[in-house]
Image: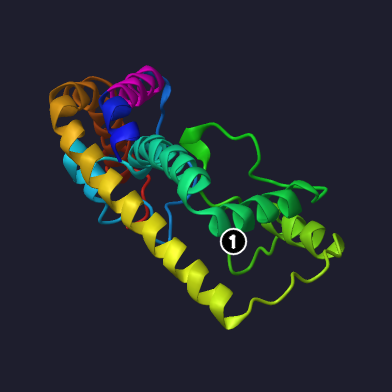
Amino acid sequence: MNRVEGSIEARVSHEVDRWLGWLPRWRPGTHRARVRLCTRCFGSPILAAAGLDVDVPHPVQHAFSMRMKGIIDAAVDDYTARNLPMLHTEIRLAEERKARRPYRAGEGLDPEFRGLDLDPEPAPDQPFLFTLSGLEADAAAEANEPAPRPFTFEEKEALRDEVRLADEFAKQLGRRICVELAQHRDRIGHAVGVYVEPLVEELLADLDRELDAPGWPG
């Protein structure tokens, strides 16, 4: 952990700065609300540490949590490459298989959009002719990748141990990030008050005006 710990403060500060630079460009979406909870954001201790866990629109939360996830992913990748050779090999092989797919819908997205559903929620009476996730699944099926060699019992146990070590490292790093985020809560909260809350209030005011319109049914 020592090799990463010295740079965590700078990495967190840098990603908070980048999120703050993106925030003035955010606008509330006009599409239908999400039906499924985002497992990345719901109950996130990182969002709680940043003060973004209550009364903040999900796209704003998601953009922040994915930037913090990027810090963790990069550090875990480095830790795995240096200390967990079997897991590192399996991850590399999986990435090579993915790279050979002819179509990857989520490739090259900015952090603010990674991890979101590729397609909107379908309406019951309006099925899609095609979906991005469906096209990606079809492309993966057409790749005809050979099945990987099955693991021996000993290899499975060794891989489980390495996965456990990687998970423990990621959790430890997540706790460290939560501690660092406490130093940024004030400027994060100030930015939400300046850029997000007025837009949400305007959206609610527009809704009230529509509901109070004389032509509204009933």
The relative height of residue 11 versus residue 90 in the rendered view (above or below) is: above
Along the line of sight, the residue nearer the viewer: 129 or 63: 63
- Considering the numbered disc 1 on the image, is that residue within a helix, a strand or a loop? loop
Q: Position of residue 198 (x, y in %)?
A: 25, 25
Q: Position of residue 179 (x, y in %)?
A: 16, 37
Q: Which residues are magenta?
A: 10-23
Magenta span: predominant SS is: helix
Q: Position of residue 217 (x, y in %)?
A: 37, 55
* Residue at point 25%, 44% (across, down): 46
- From where the camera sits, is residue 20 visible? yes
Whether residue 74 appears in magenta in the rendering, the answer is no
* Residue at point 20%, 36% (across, down): 50
Q: Which residue is mark 1?
A: 122
Q: Check the picture and name the quadrant holding the N terminus.
A: top left
Quarter occupied by residue 173 = top left
Q: Position of residue 17 (x, y in %)?
A: 33, 19
Amino acid type at circle 1 is Pro
* Residue at point 42%, 52% (across, down): 33
Q: Is residue 90 left or right of residue 157?
A: right
Q: Is residue 51 left or right of residue 27?
A: left
* Residue at point 25%, 56% (across, down): 43
- From where the camera sits, is residue 53 visible? no
Q: Check the picture and name the quadrant holding the C terminus.
A: bottom left
Quarter occupied by residue 38 = bottom left
Within 10 Å of disc 1 (Cα), the crowding (few <14, some 14-19, many 20+) is few
